[in-house]
C-alpha cells in the first residue's frame, strides 16, 4: 500500500491555512483536540459522584479549568525540552546543528516533540498545581491519568498523517510505503523511509496507547471504582503505556541518527521501562491499602 499524499498543513478548500513558517497543521489540531476533549472528560469525571465512593473529587470545575492551562504548558515545554535532551543531544548531527544555531530549539513548527518529555512536563505541572492549591498530588494524578490516552490517540494519528515515526520494514500485506510527494519535497527530493513497505506503527500506537489504554482506564474508574484508591489510576496508566510503548518499539523504526544501544534497546524502551516499574509499585501500593474515607486522606 502506498502512503496517501496528505499535506500536513490544513487546507480550507484550495487555500492552505499558512502564513510564512506559521501554519495550522493537523499535528497542532491533534494537540487542541486532545486537550479540549481531555478537559471535558475531567469535568465529567468530577460530576460522576458514584465513582468516587465516600471521597470527593480532588478538584473543582474552576480548578480544572486552571489546571488545563498548566498541563498545556507542561506538554509543550516538556515535549520540546525532552526531544532536545533525549534525541537531539544524542544525535551527533542534530547536536552540532543545535550548538551552531541555538534558536533552532524554538522552532517547534518544524517538528520534534517527545512524549516522555511531555509526560515529565505534565507531571511537573500537576505537582506545582497541587502544591499551590493544597491538593493531594496522587489523587489529582488519578484525575488526569484517564484523559491522557485521548491526546495520545490524536497525536499518533497526526504522526501518521505527517508520514513520520514510521515502522520497520515488513513483508506483511498491511505494510505501507511511506514515500510520497510531500515527504520528498520536504527532504530535498529524498524519501527518508525508503521504497519499502513498513509497519504503520503510528496506527498501532494510536490503537494501543490511545483507544485500548483509554478503555482500560475507563473500566478502572467507572467499573472497578479505583478512584477510591489513591494512585491506582496513575499506576495503571504507567503500566499500560510503558508496556505498550516498549512492546511496539520492536516494530517502530528507531529515530534516524540514534546510536545502537546495548541489548537491542531503543530510546523509547529505556524511557518506558522505568514508567512500567513505577506503575507496578504504585498500583501494588494502592491495592494493598484499604479504601480510605474522606476523613482519613493524607494532607
Image (cartoon, grey):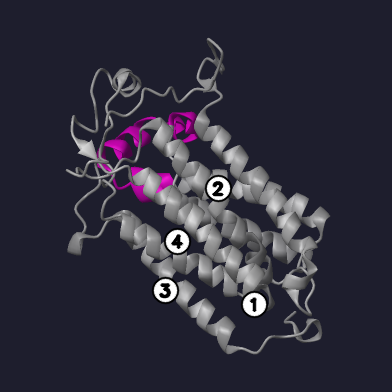
Q: Magenta residues? A: 83-110
Q: Nearer the viewer, mark 4 or mark 3?
A: 4
Q: Which residue corresponds to mark 4?
A: 241
Q: Which residue corresponds to mark 2?
A: 151
Residue 201: % across, % down: 33, 46
Q: Earlier in the sequence, mark 1 or mark 4?
A: 1
Q: Is residue 154 left or right of residue 267?
A: right
* Separation of residues labelled 4 and 2 (CA atoms): 13 Å
The stretch drawn in magenta includes residue 113 = no
* Separation of residues labelled 4 and 3 (CA atoms): 11 Å
- Residue 288 in the image: above or below residue 86: below
- What residue lies at 19% left-to-right and 31% top-to-bottom? 194
- Label 1: how many Cα within 10 Å (few below 14, some 14–19, many 20+): many
Q: Which residue corresponds to mark 1?
A: 230
Q: Earlier in the sequence, mark 1 or mark 2?
A: 2
Q: Is residue 176 left or right of residue 84?
A: left
* Separation of residues labelled 3 and 2 (CA atoms): 23 Å
Who is closer to the viewer here, 175 or 230? 175
Q: Secondary structure at mark 3?
A: helix
In this rendering, does residue 90 appear at all? yes
The stretch drawn in magenta includes residue 96 = yes
- Label 3: how many Cα within 10 Å (few below 14, some 14–19, many 20+): some
Q: Secondary structure at mark 4?
A: helix
| Quadrant assignment for the N terminus | top left
Q: Which residue corresponds to mark 3?
A: 277
Amino acid at each position: 500500500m502506498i502512503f496517501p499524499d496528505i499535506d500536513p498543513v490544513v487546507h480550507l478548500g484550495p487555500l492552505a491555512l499558512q502564513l510564512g513558517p506559521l501554519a495550522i497543521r493537523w499535528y497542532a489540531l491533534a494537540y487542541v483536540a486532545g486537550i479540549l476533549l481531555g478537559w471535558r472528560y475531567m469535568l465529567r469525571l468530577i460530576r460522576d459522584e458514584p465513582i468516587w465512593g465516600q471521597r470527593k473529587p480532588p478538584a473543582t470545575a474552576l480548578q480544572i479549568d486552571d489546571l488545563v492551562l498548566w498541563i498545556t504548558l507542561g506538554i509543550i515545554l516538556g515535549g520540546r525540552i525532552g526531544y532536545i535532551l533525549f534525541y537531539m543531544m544524542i544525535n551527533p548531527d542534530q547536536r552540532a546543528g543545535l550548538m551552531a544555531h541555538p534558536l533552532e530549539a524554538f522552532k517547534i513548527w518544524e517538528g520534534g516533540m517527545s512524549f516522555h518529555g511531555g509526560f515529565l512536563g505534565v507531571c511537573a505541572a500537576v505537582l506545582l498545581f497541587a502544591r499551590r492549591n493544597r491538593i493531594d498530588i496522587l489523587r489529582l494524578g488519578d484525575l488526569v491519568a484517564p484523559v491522557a490516552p485521548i491526546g495520545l490517540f490524536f497525536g499518533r494519528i497526526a504522526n501518521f498523517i505527517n508520514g513520520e515515526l514510521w515502522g520497520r520494514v515488513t513483508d506483511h500485506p498491511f505494510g505501507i510505503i511511506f514515500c510520497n510527494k510531500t515527504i520528498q519535497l520536504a527532504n530535498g527530493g529524498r524519501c527518508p523511509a525508503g521504497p519499502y513497505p513498513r509497519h504503520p506503527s503510528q496506527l498501532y500506537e494510536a490503537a494501543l496507547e490511545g483507544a485500548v489504554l483509554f478503555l482500560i482506564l475507563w473500566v478502572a474508574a467507572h467499573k472497578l471504582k479505583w478512584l477510591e484508591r489513591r494512585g491506582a489510576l496513575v499506576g495503571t496508566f504507567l503500566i499500560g503505556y510503558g508496556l505498550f510503548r516498549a512492546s511496539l518499539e520492536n516494530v517502530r523504526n528507531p529515530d534516524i541518527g540514534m546510536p545502537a544501544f546495548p541489548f537491542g534497546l531503543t530510546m523509547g524502551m529505556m524511557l518506558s521501562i522505568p514508567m512500567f516499574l513505577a506503575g507496578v509499585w504504585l498500583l501494588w501500593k494502592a491495592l494493598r491499602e484499604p479504601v480510605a474515607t474522606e476523613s482519613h486522606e493524607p494532607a
